[in-house]
Image: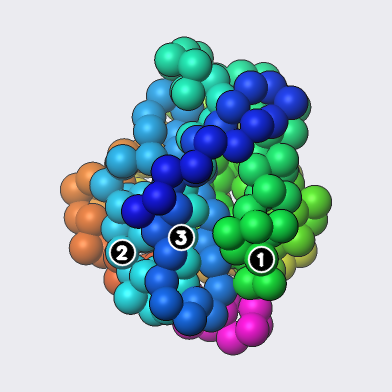
Amino acid sequence: MTLLAVDTPHGPAKVHLHPVDSPKAALVLGHGAGGGVGSKDLVAATEVAQAEGVSVALVEQPYRVAGRRAPAPPGQLDTAWTAVVEHLRAGELAGLPLICGGRSLGARVACRTAEATGAVAVLCLAFPVHAPGRHDPAHSRLPELEAVKVPVLVVQGESDPFGMPPPGPLREVVQVPGDHGLKKDVGAVAVAVREWLPGAVPQAA
C-alpha cells in the first residue's frame, strides 16, 4: 500500500493506493460521513477488487485529514473528490478505466460526480436513501442514484434505517444481512461485489 497526499481546493486529501500488477481497471472508493477508509465493507471491496485484477484507491476527504468528524458541505466534498480523481487519472491510475464508489456519504459523492469523473460504473455500499425516519420524497436522496447513467451496484443492509433503494435499468441492488454498517455479514458484501465487478470491468476495458 502506498499513501499519497493530494492537494484539493479544500485542503489536502489522502489516498491509500493498493495497486495490482497489470491492472484491468481501477476502483476509487470514498468513506462514510464519520468513518474512515478502514471500515469492514471498504476493506472487503478492496480485497475483492485486487483479487479480480483491479487496483484500488481509498480516498480520505480533506475534512477527515484535518481531524474533523463533521463532513464538509456537499459542494466541497464533490470538488475535493473530483480533484483527487483527476490527479489519479493523470498519474498513478493513468490509462485505466475507473469505477468510482464508496460507503454511505462516499457513495453519494461518487454518484453526484460520476459524469464529471468519467466513471464507467459506480459501487455504492450502504447508500443512504433518506435520513432515519424521514421517508417523505422531499428528503429523498434517490435522485442522486437515478441521475447516474452508468451501471451501479448498491449493497444494502436488509434492516438499514436509511432505506432501501429500488433496482433500476442500470442499477442492481443486493440486500445483505445487517443494517447501515454492513458489519453483520462482511462475506455477503464481498460476494455481492465479486459477482458484479467482472461485469463492470469488461465494459471498462
Q: Quarter-wise, where is residue 117 in the image?
A: bottom right
Q: Is residue 203 magenta?
A: yes
Predominant secondary structure in magenta? Answer: helix
Q: Nearer the viewer, residue 130 or 203?
A: 203
Residue 155 location (% of width, % of height)? 42, 57
Q: Tell me which label, 1 or 2, sits earlier in the chain.
A: 2
Q: Is residue 18 above or below residue 141?
A: below
Mark 3 surroundings: few (<14), some (14-19) or many (≥20) residues within 10 A: many
Look at the numbered disc 1 and give the secondary structure of its residue. Answer: loop
- Find disc 3 in the rendering and name its residue: 56
Q: Earlier in the sequence, mark 3 or mark 1?
A: 3
Q: Are marks 1 and 2 in contact (CB under 8 Å)?
A: no
CA gap, disc 3 and disc 1: 13 Å
Q: Nearer the viewer, mark 3 or mark 1?
A: 1
Q: Earlier in the sequence, mark 3 or mark 2?
A: 2
Look at 20% across and 55% down and name the residue there: 185
Tell me the CA gap for discs 1 and 2.
21 Å
Place of residue 94 in the rendered image (x, y in percent of width and height, measured from the top left)? 66, 66
The residue nearer to you, when weighing 153 against 173, is 153
Which quarter shows the C terminus?
bottom right
Residue 73 occupies quadrant: top right
Residue range in magenta is 197-205
Residue at 52% x, 62% y is: 27
Residue 47 has which mark? 2
